């Protein structure tokens, strides 16, 4: 691929990620966006006063931290499906670039460990797919703020895939 | 904003407006005949997870059950201490119905010196047909802050 063609493909993949992120009104409501390096995503929760649970501490609401973890897991699974489609090229990739997005995986269960209270500032999260089965995926995900090795919360969960062939 | 047109009327409800995220979601406490409290989040299009279905995002259910379990623990301690969530497990039984409020019925079933053990059910019309269930452990903290 020429340099220009590579840049064009990168822009198309970034556009697909943005469409996928903006699909969910709730992502906009709490202010989650994603940055990517290749197929790896990092979620960014932009701090806003309405995310505070207890104003006396003040700390992010535990439900918001849990939501960030769940969103990151679902988005990583959906992005992996999109990525495979784009890598496959041909009609499949063309459909994605024309705006067709995969159905989002559904959460079966999620177990969240709260490790530190979330401070009133941006938070980040990254998910690892432990097993991508045909129908069910197992995902681990961690959220942090200032330092990646001081996570504020971690979770693992099972997700039902909606596009099983 | 907190009274969407699809939301059916109900008994007296108390807002949780001192808590910014609870206020943003429109969370209310709904006293029950048996003396218990359910937490309610009204249906709101801003909280939809997947627009293909109109179903509220799981993150809202997590917030509802975390809030409900924390309140159940604090009520059991007579409001003399606070709590911080140690862990929370959520099981999703079925999607909630678009247009319907989601309620959380939570209880603190065991209190030790340091830890409150809680469980809860999220439902949209019948607690016996839950949208999700939760179980969690909460650290007991001095009022207003974390140790």
Image (tube, rainbow, N blue to C red):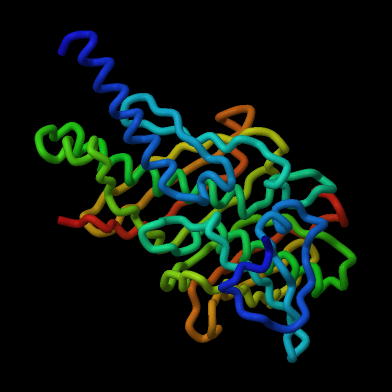
Residue found at the far left of this picture: A90
Q: From what the image shows, is residue A76 above or below residue A160?
A: above
Residue found at the far front of this picture: B5
Q: From what the image shows, is residue A157 above or below residue B32?
A: above
Front-most of A7 and A108? A7
- Quarter of the figure that contains the N terminus of chain B: bottom right
Residue A120 placed where, x, y %? 72, 37
- Tally of numbered tags: 0
Q: From what the image shows, is residue A77 above or below residue A125?
A: below
Residue found at the far top of this picture: A3
Left or right: where does residue A100 sit relative to residue B91? left
Residue B32 placed where, x, y %? 73, 85
Residue A127 placed where, x, y %? 42, 40
Question: Which residue: 41% across, 72% down?
Answer: B94
Residue found at the far right of this picture: B80
Left or right: where does residue A85 sit relative to residue A39? left
Left or right: where does residue A144 sit relative to residue B32? left
Left or right: where does residue B88 sit relative to residue A9? right
Question: Which residue: 65% across, 58% down?
Answer: B25
Q: Quadrant of residue B55?
A: bottom left
Question: Which residue: 62% across, 33% down?
Answer: A145
Front-most of A79 and B81? A79
Question: Which residue: 73% across, 84% down?
Answer: B11
Q: Quadrant of residue B112?
A: bottom right
Residue A132 placed where, x, y %? 27, 49
């Amino acid at each position: 691929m020429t340099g220009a063609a590579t840049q064009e493909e990168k822009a198309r993949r970034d556009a697909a990620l943005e469409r996928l992120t903006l699909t969910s009104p709730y992502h906009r409501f709490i202010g989650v966006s994603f940055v990517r390096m290749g197929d790896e995503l990092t979620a960014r929760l932009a701090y806003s006063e309405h995310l505070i649970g207890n104003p006396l501490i003040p700390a992010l609401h535990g439900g918001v931290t849990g939501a960030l973890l769940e969103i990151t897991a679902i988005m990583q699974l959906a992005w992996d499906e999109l990525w495979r489609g784009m890598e496959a090229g041909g009609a499949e990739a063309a459909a994605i670039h024309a705006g067709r997005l995969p159905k989002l995986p559904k959460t079966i269960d999620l177990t969240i460990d709260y490790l530190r209270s979330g401070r009133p500032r941006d938070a980040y999260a990254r998910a690892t797919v432990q097993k991508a089965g045909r129908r069910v995926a197992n995902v681990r995900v961690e959220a942090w703020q200032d330092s990646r090795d001081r996570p504020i919360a971690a979770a693992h969960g099972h997700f039902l895939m909606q596009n099983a062939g | 904003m907190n009274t969407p047109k699809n939301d059916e009327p109900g008994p007296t409800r108390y807002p949780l407006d001192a808590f910014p995220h609870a206020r943003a979601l429109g969370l209310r406490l709904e006293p029950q005949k048996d003396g218990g409290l359910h937490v309610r989040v009204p249906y709101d299009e801003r909280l939809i997870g997947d627009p293909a279905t109109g179903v509220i995002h799981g993150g809202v259910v997590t917030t509802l059950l975390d809030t409900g379990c924390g309140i159940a623990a604090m009520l059991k301690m007579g409001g003399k201490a606070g709590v911080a969530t140690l862990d929370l497990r959520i099981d999703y039984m079925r999607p909630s119905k678009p247009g319907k409020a989601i309620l959380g019925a939570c209880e603190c079933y065991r209190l030790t010196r340091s830890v409150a053990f809680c469980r809860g059910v999220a439902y949209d019309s019948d607690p016996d047909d839950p949208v999700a269930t939760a179980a969690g452990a909460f650290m007991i903290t001095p009022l207003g802050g974390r140790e």
